Amino acid sequence: MTAIFIAIALAVVLLLSAPRLLLGPTLYDRVLAGAAICIHATLIAAALAVFSGRSDWIDVSFGLMAAAMVFAVAVLKFFRMRTFQAPLSGAGEAG
């Protein structure tokens, strides 16, 4: 029973992070909010695994955590380099 209350509390916190994702003043605030939402979704899936007694939700939580990590790195790399491609030459090389 405690697991369902924890899942509800985490859902409320997840909803409180949504305005930061949509209206964040900087890109880094939005990325941080997106990562926080994914972490809260992961914890909700883990709480549901405890509540239901099924281990399928644990697999879902691992998938969500991996997706959150890839999402954060990809967004920050894209906005730093303005591309997903690796540079063709080093920074000190000419031409």
Image: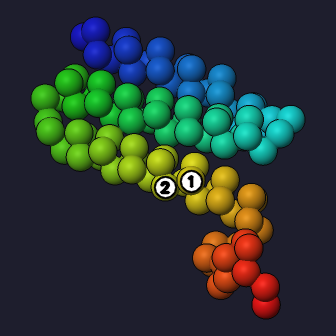
The colour style of the image is rainbow
Q: Which mark is residue 39?
A: none
* Residue holding disc 1: 73
Say which amino acid is labelled 1. Answer: Val
**In terms of secondary structure, where does tag 2 sit?**
helix
Q: In terms of depth relative to the viewer, which is nearer, 46 or 30?
A: 30
Q: Is residue 68 visible?
A: yes
- From this viewpoint, which residue is outermost toward the bottom? 95
Residue 33 place in picture, x, y as percent? 65, 35
The answer, for residue 23, to whether it is visible in the render is: no
Vertical arrangement, residue 2 with respect to residue 75, above or below: above
Q: Do the numbered discs 2 and 1 sit on residues whose CB atoms are within 8 Å?
A: yes
Q: Residues within 10 Å of mark 1 (few under 14, many from 20)?
A: few
Which percent across, then down, holds residue 66?
39, 50
The residue beneath circle 2 is: 70
Residue nearest the viewer, comparing 27 with 45: 27
Residue 23: x and y in percent read 82, 37
Q: Name the amino acid type tagged 2.
A: Val
Question: Would residue 80 be found to the left or right of residue 88 on screen?
Answer: right
Whole-percent x, y for residue 17 in the image: 65, 28
- Label 2 and label 1: CA atoms lie apart by 5 Å
Kindly state the secondary structure of the residue where label 1 is placed.
helix
Left or right placement of residue 74 versus residue 26 in this view: left
Q: Quadrant of residue 89?
A: bottom right
